[in-house]
Image: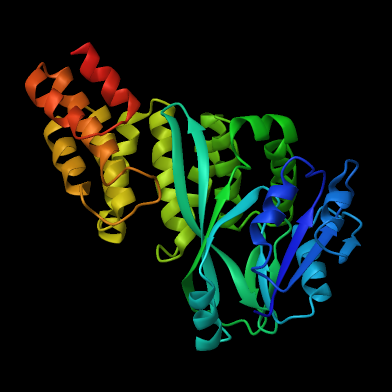
């Protein structure tokens, strides 16, 4: 399979080996671009490939990404970060995708572990990572995006590649200071272009990861003040993360304003669950219960368990708060081995 893996790295000795081991035999070439490592990153990379290149860091992720694309001998590119590990890679289906349309962009499934005031969650997203470099390159100095060279919108297709992303767990954030770096770059970008809602969205996401919900609220509010195209994928995530930001900040009544997005996202499991959570926190329990139960059995959402144990658990919490212990016990029992539900059953 003629696919080049292209990566940019810096001081990734703790995770690079696991990443590269996970793709051995799956790609025909590995390109590593090092942007100034001071640890053993380069030595680890050389255990897997002789194509390790230096790049003078210039605070621009797209330039580094595009440099890695230039070094690839194949047209088809798979992009990974060092803190990602490939869990599944179905070669036959990936080959079918490549043969079907060389101008499509493949979206791999990425599983993130995120922590906030509501606990630890698995957040599932699709990201553009497999593409033909004849048609695409990167733009944006941070949170760089795959952009068509021909200035046309392109078709995105989900491909059968799954990666585990550990880069935003609390331990990794504390160690690498990744969010501090991102904030600095985002503020610089906004000074150059303060009319780009995507930059404010990413600024809000970064503050959210730091649990700085007041600054996240300000950034998300700024992003939402623009005339947005609600069909753009990041806009839906903007709305949802803004909602969780409001809940984490205790702005429960203000969160009810998200009802206005029902026409756009009313069929989305993630939006339905979020609105049920908002109704729950505002004491609108009947509507909250209906919302959570409507999530049961839906197809997979971005957060693991929305269509099963998380919705059952919240219904149980509502009934327990209202004093209906039998009903609460019933719904807690539907949660399987979900720890908070098991603790609730022992409490009852």
What residue is shown at x 68% (from left), y 73% (from top)? 77
Most distant residue in the front direction: 25
Residue 183, located in which quarter of the rendered image? top right
What residue is shown at x 24% (from left), y 31% (from top)? 314
The image position of residue 164, as x and y in percent, is 55, 49
Q: Which residue is at the front of the view, 115 or 332?
A: 332
Q: Is residue 175 left or right of residue 319?
A: right
Q: Which residue is at the front of the view, 204 or 33?
A: 33
The image position of residue 267, as x and y in percent, is 25, 58
Q: Which residue is at the front of the view, 224 or 325?
A: 325
- Does 17 sit above or below residue 346? below
Q: Is residue 5 left or right of residue 152?
A: right
Q: Is residue 284 visible?
A: no
Q: Which residue is at the front of the view, 63 or 302?
A: 302
- Quarter of the figure with the C terminus: top left
Q: Which scheme is used to colour this image of the protein? A: rainbow
Residue 298, located in which quarter of the rendered image? bottom left
- Does 181 sit above or below residue 35? above
Q: Is residue 137 left or right of residue 234?
A: right
The image position of residue 320, as x and y in percent, is 16, 19
The image position of residue 242, as x and y in percent, is 44, 42
What residue is shown at x 14% (from left), y 24% (from top)? 328
Q: Is residue 246 visible?
A: yes
- Does 290 sit above or below residue 156? above
- Quarter of the figure with the N terminus: bottom right
């Amino acid at each position: 399979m003629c696919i080049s893996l292209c990566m940019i790295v810096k001081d990734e000795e703790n995770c690079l080996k696991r990443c590269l081991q996970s793709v051995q035999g799956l790609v025909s070439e590995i390109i590593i671009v090092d942007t100034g490592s001071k640890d053993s990153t380069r030595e680890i990379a050389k255990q897997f490939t002789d194509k390790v290149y230096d790049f003078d860091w210039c605070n621009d992720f797209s330039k580094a990404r595009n440099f890695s694309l230039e070094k690839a001998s194949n047209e088809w590119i798979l992009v990974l970060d060092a803190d990602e590990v490939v869990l599944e890679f179905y070669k036959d289906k990936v080959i079918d995708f490549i043969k079907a349309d060389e101008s499509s962009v493949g979206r791999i499934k990425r599983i993130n572990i995120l922590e906030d005031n509501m606990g630890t969650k698995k957040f599932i997203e699709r990201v553009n990572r497999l593409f033909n470099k004849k048609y695409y390159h990167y733009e944006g100095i941070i949170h760089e995006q795959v952009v068509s060279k021909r200035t046309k919108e392109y078709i995105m297709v989900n491909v059968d590649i799954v990666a585990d992303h550990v880069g935003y767990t609390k331990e990794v954030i504390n160690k690498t200071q990744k969010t501090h770096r991102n904030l600095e770059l985002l503020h610089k970008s906004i000074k150059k272009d303060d009319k780009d809602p995507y930059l404010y969205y990413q600024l809000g996401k970064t503050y959210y990861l730091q649990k700085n919900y007041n600054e996240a609220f300000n950034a998300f509010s700024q992003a939402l003040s623009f005339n947005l195209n609600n069909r753009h994928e990041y806009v839906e995530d903007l709305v949802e993360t803004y909602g969780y930001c409001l809940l984490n900040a205790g702005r429960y009544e203000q969160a009810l304003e998200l009802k206005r997005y029902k026409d756009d996202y009313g069929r989305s499991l993630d939006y339905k669950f979020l609105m049920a959570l908002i109704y729950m926190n505002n004491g609108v329990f009947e509507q909250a219960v209906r919302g959570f139960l409507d999530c049961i059995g839906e197809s997979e959402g971005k957060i693991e368990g929305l269509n099963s144990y998380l919705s059952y658990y919240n219904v149980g919490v509502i009934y327990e708060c209202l004093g209906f212990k039998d009903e609460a016990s019933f719904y807690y029992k539907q949660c399987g081995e979900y720890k908070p539900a098991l603790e609730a059953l022992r409490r009852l």
